[in-house]
Amino acid sequence: MALISASRKDPAAPSQDPPPPSRPGLLTRLRRKRLSAQTLLVGGAVIVVGYLAVVPLGYLIHDTFLDADGSGVSLDAFSRAYGGNSQSGDMLLNSLWFALGSAALALILGTTLAYIQVRTDTPFKSLFFAASLVPLIVPGILYSTSWIFLGDPQSGLLNALLFKPLTGTSPVNIYSVWGMIWVQGLHLSPVAFLLMVAAFRAMDPSLEESAAMSGASRLTVLRRITVPLVRPALISAALLMFVQSLESFEVPALLGLQNGIYVFTSRIYFVLRSYPTDYGAAGAYAIGLLLIAAAGVLLSSWLQRSSRNFQTVTGKAFRPRPVELGRARPVVGVAVIVYFLITVVLPVAVLVYASLLKYYAAPSAETLSSLTFDNYRQVFDMPLAFTALKNSLILGLGAATVVMLLTAVVSWVVLRTKARGRRLLDLLAFTPIVIPGLVLGLALAFVYLRMPLPIYGTLLILLVSYCTRYLPYGMRYSSAAMAQMAPELEESAAVSGASWFQTFRRVLLPLMSSGILAGWVYILVVSFRELSSTILLYSPGKEVLSVLIWEQFENGQFTTLAALGVCMVLLLVVLVALAYRLGARFGLQGQADSSN
Amino acid sequence: MLTVESLKKSYDEAPGRAARRKKRDTTRTYAVGGVDFEVNDGELFTLLGPSGCGKTTTLRSIAGLERPTEGKVALGGRVLFDSAQDVNLRPNQRGFGMVFQSYAIWPHMTVAKNVSFPLEVMPRAKRPSRQEIDHQVAEVLESVELGAYAQRSATKLSGGQQQRLALARALVTRPELMLLDEPLSNLDAKLRETMRFELKRLQRELNLTAIYVTHDQAEALVMSSRIAVMNEGRVEQIGKPREIYTRPATRFVAEFIGTSNFLEGKVVAVNGGEVEVDTPHGRLVAADPPRKPVVGDPVLLSIRPECVDLSRERRGLPNEWTGTVRTRAFLGDVVDHIVQIGDTEIRNRSNPTLSIPPGTEVHFSVTPDKVTLVPVG
């Protein structure tokens, strides 16, 4: 807060805080500061971040606690949401059970795979990274749909083709908490994998080698050295998995609602879609969800309190001597292939299969003989499909550009200046990561239904929402790029006579370009799958691709959905491939930079 | 030319905030605690000291990269920083050239682009034409023998070449003052020695004024016109290399530069230019002390090992003592003997033709003008 009020005060009236007589230069300094491009740009960035992160939450809290006649504070919304026969206890338990279970599954799978990939001589090393692309190219809504095709108690392929012939029963039921955990955990495991790969790579292997030289066995080294060293990374990965599962909307909505299994997000959606709409109760659920996420953050920072002093990330990639698996090598190899089949091949294959059917059914001689491209024809004839594609592209490009420019400036303020409140700014920019998409959508609806700005019902409100949601991701890319760069590179430009703006444009931005570009493409890609905030904010004619898919699901048009999904996956594959080509080219230069 | 007056820098708190809380200076720790010096035209002025002594902070304060807590920095008549008048020019307004320890070569630019950058960012009124820029860049690259590499990517250069590129970039605007922050410390030992002479040659030929920061005493002695020895944020002594070496003003300087034997004693007589000092092991005569002591003053005597003259026979020289050789160490170009006298050890450094086995009784002497009186206190 200090930061925002200070920066707003700067150009405004200094009369509030009269300058002490001992410092005659203050006024001239203020005037000089006001004119510089640096102050304008930095001040602007600070205000925008503050606005994006703080205003929606403020409105959310305000509107939830407002009582019916709009004048006093009341807890009515909470009693409507949690009291009586709302079954909120079940919902709370389901939410926690689902989030913790998915996080645990993702973390265990991801960490094990990361250790195997980085530290052992396992076969198929490149397969790991192919699998890690899944969450990028198969959005949650499609992944859930695929698992419906696979795990539906009646028509699911696993039951129809595997268990029915073998055991005569249909044991797999995807419409359960276990099913939800399975799908969410699998979908998140590549994210955990990537985070832990980075942690294992950043660890200096000589730390382990010196333990081995001190006489520790391989198991002791793992327990006393390796695990404690990656603990900080492990905890932050666990937090991220937990929060992402908690805020996941697609999985609980597609798999849970069928059997009336509610979690926070699906309950908020349910409340908002019933008539009359109880915004207060939805707000109360949203605040409950935020509190749980915040508790997770507090818990993880409490767990991390002692591990700050040994940051293992040195920015340098080590290539340790791999552990030889020996006779276990073929077993590990098979496990890797099975993992790849389950997470990637099966879901994608079933989606393609479903897209070629008239009605979804397990493969038989009859279904296989009637495969058709009708669904694709239907998709291309849909006038809305092109509007949605156009809107998705506009939003993706817009959000990626705005966020990366904004975070480039913000990360400079946070990492390179000693400005007061820079930590607060950092915190603000990261806040949206714990705001579930649905909550943000609701909060933004509160804001722009009241504000006189004519944003509601346009693409602009979606852009604001996307920028807020992806601010933390952009921040991560920008500050990583900034931190990698030695401050002397800027200082030498300043000493050479370059002004702040010249330094920013000619030294900082070009050097950060690889990181910024990577972040830009990442945001562009993830914007395509955004559903949870969009679903509350879009209006007819402003659909995006993910909303279009959602509408197919609601109408029960599973085969059209599959065709649309296949198109979307192809589009994302192209985008990700493009990103990797760019990343490879710029990444190479990035390595040369850091070795300098 | 450049004057630095009572420069102080504390990292404890921002000055504004401290003032608001009405805190007194007593709670602060200073990285630089009141430094004064003056750099003359055409001089290579060295700030020498161990790591953490405040030399780099002082240099960065002069460059404008750090904002000092107090003090004044002026170049000729131009005030660059003055805490009293609240003047603090930004680094890009000061017009210095600087070479960083890490060289800070911009990896996204070619060699030529790195060098032309300072010219290209000049204010439009002062900026030379494109042709002129190209000409100056070629010229300065030639002077550091990088002419053939102009179009290479800067990251493709070796360590020594990057070092010269950093130098060329700092030189290209012909700045009034060059700031060099440990520019040779990232080079290997051989290259470092050749670069010392190379830098010195360039500085003489171009008549540069430079401030040079280093922790390497040999480097400082070879290159400097004058040296300021710093310790714990303060200047211990300023002087020409020879003065610093032969006439250290404090125990710290004597210990930090080269090695020295120290003896504590008390002045018993002052006759003209000679001072007689009583030490626990006998009397020593010191000639031409920088500051005349008074009889009864406690003093510290510093004797360089190479000034200790070792012999098997008593020769009746002034300041001649007798002791026993404890250890002998052969270092190639020299040989060291450590001689025990009472509970004190005296280190001698001689030509390797001299070699006396441990246990032998020896006589050693020091000519009075090689005995340095270091003020105590």
Image (cartoon, grey):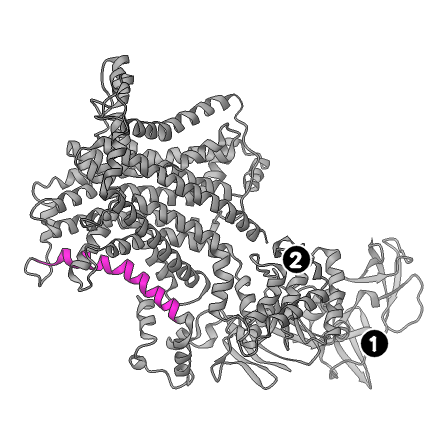
Q: Which residue is drawn at 61% across and 61% down?
A: B103
Chain letter belonging to callout 2: B
Q: Residue at x 37, y 56 (%)?
A: A401
Label 2: which residue? Answer: B186
Do discs 2 and 1 belong to a common subunit?
yes
Query: Which label belongs to residue B369?
Result: 1
> Disc 2 versus disc 1: distance between alpha carbons?
39 Å
- Tell how many labels: 2
Against B137, residue B39 (above or below) is below
In reply to whether residue A566 is colored magenta, the answer given is no
Q: Looking at the image, is mark 2 or mark 1 nearer the viewer?
A: 2
Local SS, label 2: loop
Chain letter belonging to callout 1: B
Let me know if residue A96 appears in the view: no
Query: Which label belongs to residue A444?
Result: none
- Residue B251 spot, x, y in % from top left: 69, 71
- Residue B360 spot, x, y in % from top left: 88, 56
User: What is the span of residues highlighted in magenta in the rendered image?
Assistant: A40-67
Q: Label 1 amino acid?
A: Asp
Q: Residue B104: which quarter of the image? A: bottom right
Q: Label 2 amino acid?
A: Asn
- Residue A473 spot, x, y in % from top left: 37, 51
- Residue A180 spot, x, y in % from top left: 25, 33
Q: Specify whether B359 is left or right of A260.
A: right
